[in-house]
């Protein structure tokens, strides 16, 4: 059977698109596994750009011969105490001294220090900060030397040990996270659609989008245009896979409807793209704008996610509107094999799940939205108990990381702030006044200036008229009490005339991050809401309906926070959350939650223009019910895959987004929004109700409830 010239011409565009994407996949595919080459997990990159503690990092570099990354060696003897541990101090000094000159060790190695309880020793070994993948090897050398001290147990704590554990947590993130996400999506699609080929096509489209996004981000990161770390890298993979799958499901559902009406697969593909284009682009725009709003943040990590995530969403849209339609046009009905394309029953008849949901909403819309609203408000009430004061150091990793266990041991025998001193940089002429004020501050255990010799009691090291003072806090460096001490210390030191004192260090960084996160939320949350509202107004050509949609997704976010507060504390055992978690959760949930309302209400508007408001709502709910629910389940599952990375921050984000998406899909979009639209009638579409109304809407006697429900906006 020969192909006619007309048919051959119609094949040209889909074939060229398919070949172009295959070239993209072949050439750029490897970049999906190479982002780690340009990624950094330097914890300093998570700090606020304009905070006092960040200024201290820059100032204290002048006091070092070279930049170092310290590791704290802790020796304990659980069987012998007192003099027996003190007797091992010379051996510990020899072990530390033996590390001088070791490859990777930089700067002056400290002598061993005996704890006040006589049961532990500690020493500080400065390492080069640029060791990269060699850091575990150098830490092993430090441990080997430390283990020469007889009858002791060696623990490695401090920034170097923490960075090594962080690198281990992100090791293999490219392969593991991608594999978990893709397998999860594939299984769900196979179960939902009972088709062999279609899920594979959707997965291929998502992988192509991820390959393109990773290549673009790699090129930009390699030229220092954007910044990538393990968290951004993981979220990018999940975001692209989830978004590309969502957009693909909307398009394939529309294509299935068009195929059921027409045997022409090329015309069906064009119609599916034309009728899905507005909803897909508007949905992507809400996510892109929400992510770009993160550029307003003062936290470097938040700013990094904005453009990287936006690039991923744009790539997801490109594959959904080009690669997938091309493949569907070439395959036609075969894409759904062994299932047969059938249109959803837009009239609301039958016994399907969504017909029954639509019938329930239609029967008592006010009761439905009142019950849904009451449930969401009840959950939202617990949002007041949600705390984002930071994750304690011993909860940073979901599992018991070695550096966390070592830090607990260090804190048990030495002052709580040992190993993480608060750093003060001040005018050299004010050194004694600064020392006296710091030591007199409640919550400070000790304070000492940096000396030129590197040993206590020497001449103070003065650089450009400035001195550095290390302040050891009495409480654990990650505790609320320590943060309060930093606030008191700043107040006291800032009051000293001409001292020009700056307070930094680990605890100050945590304090500044918390304050900055609060400022970011106050600024970015309203900006995101306004941007999303503007997109909805343009798409729906209405004012009241967009306001209702934004209000419902905001309420969904608060309800999710309330449930998360209960789950984090009583189920997962977290005593706090990262300060950035509420902002990330808000951006993802509100932007992605609006997606499903856009899918629903754009279809409702289309159907209402033909059948009237009541039938438009019911038809829109029935025709989009299955595909939006599937999309929500897929997106929730992909974000849940972040839980495979053993970091509290990502586990918390995974739960908030996964639960929030399901709540939005099953309650807000399925019950609350349709019931509100039915109960309000054409008023919900104001001011479009007057301009786009059916002619008989202006006749006398059309103000009854039935007429309000029946006529189109």
Image: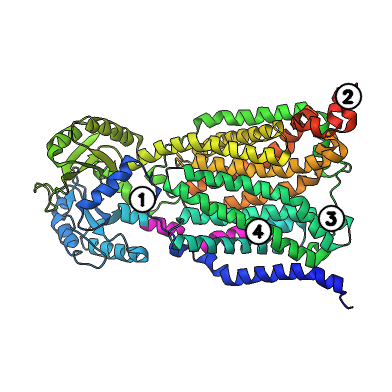
- Tag 1 residue: 44
- Name the mark on residue 318: 4
- Closest to the observer, 319 or 225: 225
Q: Is residue 702 above or below residue 505?
A: above
Q: CA distance from mark 1 to mark 2?
A: 65 Å
Q: Who's the residue at 70% across and 69% down the image? A: 18
Specify whether 43 is left or right of 148: right
Q: CA distance from mark 2 to mark 4?
A: 45 Å
Answer yes or no: is residue 202 visible: yes
- Tag 3 residue: 258
Task: Tell me which segment is drawn in magenta.
Answer: 164-183
- Closest to the observer, 143 or 302: 302
- Name the N-terminal-most of marks 2 and 3: 3
Are the two marked residues, 2 and 4, in contact with CB atoms closer than 8 angstroms?
Answer: no
- Tag 2 residue: 702
- Name the N-terminal-most of marks 4 and 1: 1
- As for residue 667 lying within the magenta part, the answer is no
Are the two marked residues, 4 and 1, in contact with CB atoms closer than 8 angstroms?
Answer: no
């Amino acid at each position: 059977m020969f192909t006619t010239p007309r048919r051959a011409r119609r094949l040209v565009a889909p074939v060229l698109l398919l070949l172009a994407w295959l070239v993209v996949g072949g050439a750029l595919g490897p970049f999906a596994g190479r982002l780690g080459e340009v990624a950094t997990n330097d914890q300093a990159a998570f700090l606020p750009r304009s905070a006092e503690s960040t200024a201290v990092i820059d100032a204290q570099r002048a006091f070092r011969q070279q930049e170092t990354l310290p590791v704290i060696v802790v020796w304990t003897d659980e069987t012998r105490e007192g003099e027996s541990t003190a007797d091992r101090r010379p051996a510990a000094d020899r072990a530390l001294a033996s590390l001088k000159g070791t490859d990777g060790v930089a700067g002056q190695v400290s002598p061993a220090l005996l704890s006040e309880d006589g049961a532990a020793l500690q020493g500080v070994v400065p390492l080069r900060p640029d060791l990269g993948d060699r850091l575990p090897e150098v830490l092993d050398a430090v441990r080997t030397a430390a283990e020469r001290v007889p009858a002791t147990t060696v623990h490695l704590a401090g920034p170097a040990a923490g960075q090594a554990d962080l690198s281990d947590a992100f090791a293999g993130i490219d392969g593991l996270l991608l594999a978990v996400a893709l397998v999860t999506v594939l299984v769900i699609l196979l179960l939902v659609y009972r088709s062999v080929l279609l899920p594979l096509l959707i997965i291929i489209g998502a992988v192509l989008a991820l390959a393109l996004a990773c290549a673009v981000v790699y090129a930009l990161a390699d030229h220092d245009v954007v910044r990538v770390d393990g968290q951004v890298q993981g979220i990018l993979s999940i975001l692209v896979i989830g978004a590309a799958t969502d957009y693909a499901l909307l398009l394939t559902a529309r294509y299935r409807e068009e195929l059921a009406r027409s045997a022409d697969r090329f015309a069906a593909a064009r119609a599916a793209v034309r009728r899905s284009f507005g909803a897909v682009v508007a949905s992507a725009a809400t996510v892109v704008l929400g992510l770009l709003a993160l550029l307003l943040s003062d936290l470097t990590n938040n700013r990094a996610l904005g453009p990287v995530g936006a690039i991923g969403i744009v790539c997801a849209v490109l594959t959904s509107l080009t690669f997938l339609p091309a493949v569907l046009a070439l395959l036609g009905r075969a894409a759904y094999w062994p299932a047969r394309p059938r249109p959803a029953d837009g009239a609301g008849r039958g016994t399907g799940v969504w017909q029954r949901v639509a019938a329930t909403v239609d029967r008592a819309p006010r009761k439905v939205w009142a019950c849904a609203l009451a449930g969401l408000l009840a959950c939202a009430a617990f949002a007041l108990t949600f705390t984002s004061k930071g994750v304690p150091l011993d909860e940073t990793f979901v599992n018991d990381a070695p550096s966390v266990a070592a830090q607990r041991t260090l804190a048990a025998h030495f002052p709580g702030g040992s190993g993480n001193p608060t750093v003060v940089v001040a005018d050299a002429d004010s050194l004694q006044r600064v020392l006296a004020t710091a030591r007199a501050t409640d919550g400070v255990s000790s304070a000492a200036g940096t000396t030129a010799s590197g040993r206590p009691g020497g001449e103070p090291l003065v650089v450009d008229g400035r001195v550095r003072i290390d302040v050891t806090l009495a409480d654990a460096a990650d505790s609320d009490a320590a943060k309060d001490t930093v606030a008191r210390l700043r107040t006291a030191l800032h009051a000293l005339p001409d001292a020009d004192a700056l307070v930094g260090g680990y605890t100050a960084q945590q304090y500044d991050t918390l304050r900055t996160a609060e400022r970011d939320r106050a600024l970015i949350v309203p900006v995101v809401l306004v941007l999303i509202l503007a997109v909805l107004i343009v798409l729906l050509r209405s004012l009241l309906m967009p306001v209702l949609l934004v209000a419902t997704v905001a309420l969904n976010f608060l309800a999710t926070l309330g449930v998360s507060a209960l789950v984090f504390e009583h189920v997962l055992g977290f005593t706090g959350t990262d300060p950035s978690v509420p902002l990330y959760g808000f951006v993802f949930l509100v932007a992605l939650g609006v997606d499903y309302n856009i899918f629903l209400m754009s279809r409702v508007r289309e159907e209402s223009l033909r059948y009237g408001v009541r039938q438009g709502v019911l038809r829109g709910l029935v025709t989009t019910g299955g595909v939006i629910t599937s999309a929500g389940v897929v997106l929730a599952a992909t974000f849940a895959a972040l839980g495979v990375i053993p970091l509290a921050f990502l586990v918390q984000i995974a739960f908030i987004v996964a639960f929030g998406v399901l709540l939005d899909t099953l309650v807000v979009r399925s019950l609350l929004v349709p019931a509100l639209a039915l109960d309000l009638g054409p008023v919900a579409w104001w001011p479009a109700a007057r301009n786009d109304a059916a002619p008989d809407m202006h006749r006398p006697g059309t103000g009854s409830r039935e007429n309000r429900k029946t006529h189109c906006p």
